[in-house]
Each structure stands twice: as C-alpha cells, then as structure tokens.
Image: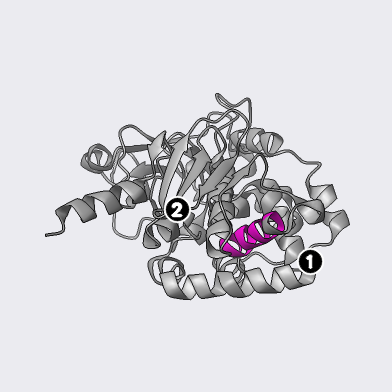
Amino acid sequence: MGHRDIALTTAKLASDVFEATRAMERIEQDGYTRIDPFKIAASEGISVMLQPLDRLYGAFIRGDESGILVNAARSAGLIHMTCAHELGHYFMGHDTAFDETIDYGSKGAIQEQEAESFGYHLLVPRPLLTIICKRKGWNRQSLQNPLILYQLSLRLGVSYAAAAWSLMRHKLFDYDMVQQLLKTTPASIKRALMQGPLPDATKEVWLLDDADQSSILEPRPEDHIVVRLKSHASAGYLWLADSVDQVAAHGFAIAPLPASKIDKDSLSFGADATMDYVVSGEDVGFDAPYPLVFTEQRPWIGKQEGDASFSSKAHFEPIADGLSREAKTALIKEALLP
C-alpha cells in the first residue's frame, strides 16, 4: 500500500471512528477543543495504562481484552498522540505492537505507517482545525506565528511539532515552512509568554484571551495559565475574582504577571491596553469543568453593574501512573451493573 493510499484509508477510518464514538460532539456541542483518545479507547472497551517506561513510547496488546500501554513520563501531547497511535493498531486490525517511536515515516513497516497516519487523522481532523481557528480568529498566515502554532497545539492536545506536521498533512504548510517553524523551540515560546525564566520548563503555558470564552480548555493541573485581558489600570481598575467566596469555592486566584508592566505615562485616562494575568489553582478537581470568572473592577468600590468581565472554563486533565481516568470510570460502571 502506497503512502497516499495509507493516508486515504486511515482518514476514512478515523472519520468512521468519530461518527461511531460521537467524538466530535464534545467539540461542537460542549465547547471542548480536542479529540480525547482515552475516551475513544474506553468506548471500545480498551483499558489504557500509563506508567513510566524506559525506551517505549507505548504498546498495543491484542487479546480477548485488548489494552494500551502509554509512557507516562512524556509530555501531554506525546501521551495523547501515543494513545492515538496505539488505537491505530487496534482499528487497523494489527497484532500486538511495541513502539519505541511513533514517528516512523515512509521507511517504517506498513502497519506502523498506518498507525502513525491514523493517529494524526484522529487527533487533528480538518473539521476540528476549522472550529478552533474560527473561534480564535486564526487564519493560515497567523498560524505561521510560532506562538499561535504553540497555542493551537495545546488546544489540539498534541505536541508543537505534531501540530506543524499536521498542518502540512492538510496542505496548509509546505515542508520548508514546517522546518522554519521547528527552529523555534516550545521552551523559548514559554519563556516569552511568562516574560522570564520558567519554574519548570516541562510544563505548558496556556495563553487565554476573550476569544476563549466559548471554549473549555484542558490543561494539566500544574500547567501555567496566562490570561491576556484589556486593562484600564491607569483608571484604577484591576481584574479580580467576583468574590472571595468564589475563589474559595473554585480554588483560583488571579494576579498580574510580575514582569507585565503598563506604562501609565503613555496612556490617557480610561484608554485600552492589555495586561497579562497569571491564574493559579490551589486545590482543583478533575471531574468537571471549572469556571474561570473575573471582573475588572475598582478594588475600593467592588463589582459594579457594567464592569467588564471574563469567563472561560478549564477541565483539568490528570495524567498520572495507573489506569486512565476513563478506564477507571468504565471499571466503576461495570462494577455497578446488576
């Protein structure tokens, strides 16, 4: 089977999987931004086990009860793509496979090329790209900005490199453009967003703005979240949680990014500018989306009718050793059946 035939076959299969598992409903109806391979595995009765592995990215075990093993020591994007790759082995009818990489290229065995192609089509389908770009107001030209491409990768749940190669697969980028974008490292983008050194460079940095108010984002609990908002600091306004009780109830606080400064001398009274704020969570859960609701208010007056507001949601994704959240949920449901 040639490369083009593999691409066509796996794209059609991924589309069939979307329809059978209703994977796009959480995107189109609920506001999420990524395909969840763990949910697809659970819908097929496949348990996903995450644990640190020495050399393997992951494995697919074919049997009476097939299963997937994923290296938990990787980044979230690689974990998602590895799970999608192993699902490719499952849906393509392959036997047990052990993967020391998930990027085999045209020189890999046919079954690995099929699993790789399926994984890309599963996590980055063209309709999903269209939805995200429409929400954010991104176009082909803006996606050539490494910062925007990095933010796209987070919303898709894949790595920065995988997002670039996916856009080439969809003929939005050519090979030279991908190579140029890969010269910018995610670490340098993260430092630019945080405007200084990172406490932990392995954690992602999400940049939210007004265009994210219709979306449910899925960071890991330890990721950094920066919200870029219009600011009227020169008029005495600050972005604050609606109430102390709300912060206590939802476990969030918001504060200006320490390195983010506004030159008050360059602003007229009430003029619009933007300022970056860091959202931090104290003790958040994973069972449901958490509201991120803040109002721009004068602290000595409190929230007033007509004050500007920002509202988004974060459904934090725990990635820890052991069965995936979805596999645990499936076991609990099975145990409760009469």
User: What is the x, y in percent for residue 133?
Assistant: 61, 66
Asked whether 36 or 143 is in front, the reply is 36
What residue sits right under mark 1 in the picture? Answer: 3
Q: Residues within 10 Å of mark 2 (few under 14, many from 20)?
A: few
Mark drawn on residue 63: 2
Residue at 45% of width from left, 33% of height from top?
Answer: 222
Q: In this rendering, would 325 be left or right of 108? A: left
Q: Please, what secondary structure does the residue beneath circle 1 have?
A: helix
Q: In this rendering, would 244 be left or right of 47? A: left
Q: Residues within 10 Å of mark 1 (few under 14, many from 20)?
A: some
Q: Please, what secondary structure does the residue beneath circle 2 have?
A: loop
User: What is the x, y in percent for residue 132?
Assistant: 56, 65
Taking the view exactly as shown, the residue that stands out farthest to the left is: 338
Amino acid type at mark 2:
Gly
Residue 140 among magenta residues: no
Dominant SS type (magenta): helix
Instruction: Provide the residue span drawn in magenta.
Output: 112-124
The part of the image, by quadrant, that contains residue 324 is top left
Mark drawn on residue 99: none
Residue 210 vs 254, above or below: the answer is: below
- Image quadrant in which the N terminus is located: bottom right
Separation of disc 2 and disc 1 at Cα?
29 Å
Q: Earlier in the sequence, mark 2 or mark 1?
A: 1
- Image quadrant in which the C terminus is located: bottom left
How many labels were placed on the picture?
2
Residue 324 vs 333, above or below: the answer is: above
